Image (cartoon, grey):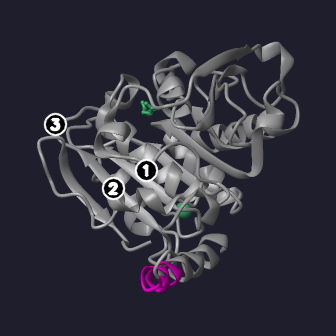
């Protein structure tokens, strides 16, 4: 529900911008208009870069120190000059560990997010359990972790690969206060997600033979409410395991999605709407633009 209110807010900001251009000396949009904007104005190059503008530190969290998930690694911007950051928990797939998602840690954190790549209780946990574990990880991160004071606990997101992506959908279904969800080549036996109101970017892999887009990513996307802010990005020629290694297409749209919906940062709208064209890396893209 909250993002519907935000949509009205975005329209208001656009209106103010238009009004602003009519007055000589009136400032254009700046960080002052949005308390959650972090980092410099983005460009195509900045969201495709291996690292963003923030220096990143990491802290490992032992599974023995937590309950409800299997520990993990926290990647966070070292600067506190701009205030707190939004945060995202990231779950791996079946049989995999946090290491399979490790590339997202520095890549997202350096853009201005606290990122928590987690291990699951067991590597065979099913998606509904992975969803609960993502939520437990965010609870730990915001309430008890060493970086809790650096995080805005109202601005949280979930990501995951395969069963972890199915888990990201489960987490959003169970917690409508989540600001963004990004399931990566998601796998789930539940094919329909009308209960999800969180802005959701589903990433499918065109040649996925484990979680085929026809049986997983595409019906998941189509079953999200039409009223929701949502997008479907299909990676051309990619396999189920594309999200397990550094991938610029996944990164640039994940960064844009998190910035747009966790930070309310309208500077990133330009990368999401109008929908990107098909290309050498994108075989299909669907969306509910404009957001
Ligand atoms: O997390 C995944 O990679 C799920 C794909 C899978 O192997 O499910 C079948 C049990
Ligand atoms: Zn369902």
Is 208 left or right of 69, judged from the image as shown?
left
Which secondary structure lies at badge 2? helix
Are discs 3 and 2 less than 8 Å apart at CB?
no
Which mark is drawn over residue 256? Answer: 1
Which secondary structure lies at badge 3? loop
**Disc 2/disc 1 C-alpha distance (Å):** 7 Å
Mark earlier in primary sequence (3, 2):
3
Provide the major secondary structure of the magenta segment.
helix
Q: x, y percentage for residue 177?
A: 71, 61
Residue 152 vs 222, above or below: the answer is above
Which mark is drawn over residue 237? Answer: 3
**Is 197 included in the stretch rendered in magenta?**
no
Is 152 left or right of 105, judged from the image as shown?
right
Q: x, y percentage for residue 125?
A: 62, 30
Nearer mark to the viewer, of 3 and 2: 2
Residue occupying the point 59% across, 78% down: 9
């Amino acid at each position: 529900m909250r993002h519907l209110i935000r949509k009205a807010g975005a329209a208001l900001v656009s209106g103010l911008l238009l009004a602003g251009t009519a007055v000589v000396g009136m400032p254009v949009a700046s960080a002052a208009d949005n308390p959650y904007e972090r980092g410099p104005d983005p460009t195509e190059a900045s969201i495709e870069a291996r690292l963003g503008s923030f220096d990143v530190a990491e802290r490992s969290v032992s599974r023995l120190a937590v309950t409800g998930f299997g520990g993990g690694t926290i990647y966070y911007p070292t600067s506190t000059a701009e205030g707190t950051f939004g945060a995202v928990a990231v779950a791996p797939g079946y049989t995999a560990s946090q290491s399979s998602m490790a590339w997202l840690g520095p890549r997202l954190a350096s853009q201005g997010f606290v990122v928590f790549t987690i291990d699951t209780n067991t590597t065979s946990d099913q998606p509904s359990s992975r969803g609960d574990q993502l939520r437990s990880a965010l609870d730990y991160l915001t309430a008890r972790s060493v970086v809790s004071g650096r995080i805005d606990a109202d601005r949280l997101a979930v990501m995951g690969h395969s069963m972890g992506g199915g888990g990201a959908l489960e987490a959003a279904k169970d917690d409508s206060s989540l600001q963004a969800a990004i399931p990566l080549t998601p796998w789930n036996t539940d094919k329909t997600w009308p209960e999800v109101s969180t802005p959701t970017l589903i990433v499918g892999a065109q040649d996925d033979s484990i979680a085929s887009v026809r049986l997983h990513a595409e019906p998941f996307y189509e079953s999200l409410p039409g009223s929701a802010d949502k997008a479907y990005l299909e990676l051309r020629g990619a396999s189920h395991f594309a999200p397990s290694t550094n991938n610029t297409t996944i990164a640039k749209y994940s960064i844009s999605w998190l910035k747009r919906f966790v930070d309310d940062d309208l500077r990133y709208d330009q990368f999401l709407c109008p929908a990107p064209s098909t290309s050498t890396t994108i075989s299909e893209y669907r969306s509910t633009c404009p957001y």
